[in-house]
Amino acid sequence: MSTDVSIAAPSARIRGLSQAAGAMFLVGTLAGVSGVIQDYPVYGGQALRYLLAAAILLAVTRLTGLRAVRLTAREGALLAALSLFGLVIFNICVIEATRRGGPALVGTVLGTVPLALALLGGRPSPRVLGAAAVVVAGATLATGLGSGDLPGLMWSLGALFCELCFSLLAIPLLPKLGAVRVSAYSAALAVPLLAVTGLLLDGTAMLRVPTLPEALGLGYQSVIVTTVAFFLWYDALPRIGAATAGLFAGLIPVGAIATGAVLGLGTPSAPDLLGAALVVAGIVIGLSAAGPPATAAGSPAAGGRQPAAGAGSPAAPASSPATGASGRRSP
């Protein structure tokens, strides 16, 4: 699947770069709240998280005048697959990988996202591949190799596959639906899937009244990591392409390190800081290696006719192919 996407203007590229960086950094901040909600039933908590996020995003679509869009059978299948793999199964894989190998193992495997997206992006230049490798090395160093077993590694590889689906399955949907609707619809579809998983594994114990810290932690996941980060990520993809955006996945451990330091959860070690420096260096190399691609004729970026379904959305300017009219997921 090609990950090349047209870019409207340098200003759109700058906005896309900033959004991709912000989205992945916010996903990294999950480490700061994971301890707060670790005793809450996992699948029930994730169902609540996506329920709140979907409610917020659907309210945004209504307030901004985004109309419902009739999807083709192919588009409906893509959206269902995006929600199933990019959100639901991703969460299951991360949860199970963490139980068996710890967060370090799954974090290290997910650090290969930039390299995987660069390889899937067609014919990446040696410089882009080198930049992705530097980002992977930095993320691995910052996260640590862990001591997981084979099942933990397999669950981590499953999470990696789902992380790629989260971006690649969304790209064909963004020109028609836009970032807000893709985020809203995928989050809404994840709720019943996670609820069924919770019922099968935990029964009626999948839900309980959260404590105040747990409620705040779940609220942070819903509003910041899901609502905001999903929109930022999906609005960035059409502006800069998945291969370039993927470089910023290396900021996930950087966000975790920064959050831990701010919340007093631990002082960054020398490998943490060196890994963060490598991630930043790799991103800089990658961005300098790939200038804005030529704009495709007839695309929204080129001034071509945009899909009527996305018209009039203030969520993104008319030059954005993301809206025709924000924000990982987080484990």
Image (spheres, helix red, strand yellow):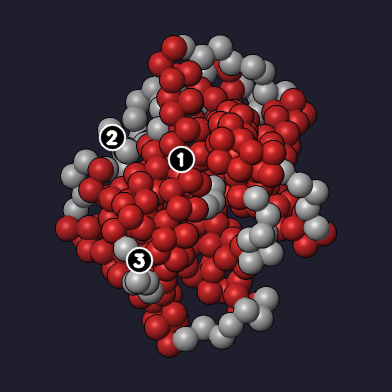
Q: Residue at x 51, y 83 (%)?
A: 268
Label 1 crowd bin: few (<14), some (14–19), many (20+), radius 10 Å: many
Badge 3 local density, few (<14 within 10 Å), some, or many (20+)? some
52 lies left or right of 298: right
Depth check, mark 3 against mark 2: the one in front is: 3
Q: Contact, CB < 8 Å: mark 1 with mark 2?
A: no
Asked which secondary structure carries label 1, the reply is: helix
Query: Closer to the camera, 319 or 226?
Result: 226
Mark 2, residue position? 2
Q: Nearer the viewer, residue 291 or 215?
A: 215
| Displayed quadrant of residue 3 | top left
Which x, y percent locates residue 246? 38, 52
Q: How crowded is the residue under tag 2: few (<14 C-alpha within 10 Å), some, or many (20+)?
A: some
Residue appearing at x 41%, y 16% in the figure: 74
Mark 1 vs mark 2: which is more N-terminal? 2
Instruction: Inspect the image, locate mark 2, and give the three-letter code of the amino acid beneath it.
Output: Ser
Would you name the residue on which mark 1 appears? Answer: 89
The first of marks 1 and 3 along the sequence is 1
Q: Residue at x 29, y 58 (%)?
A: 150
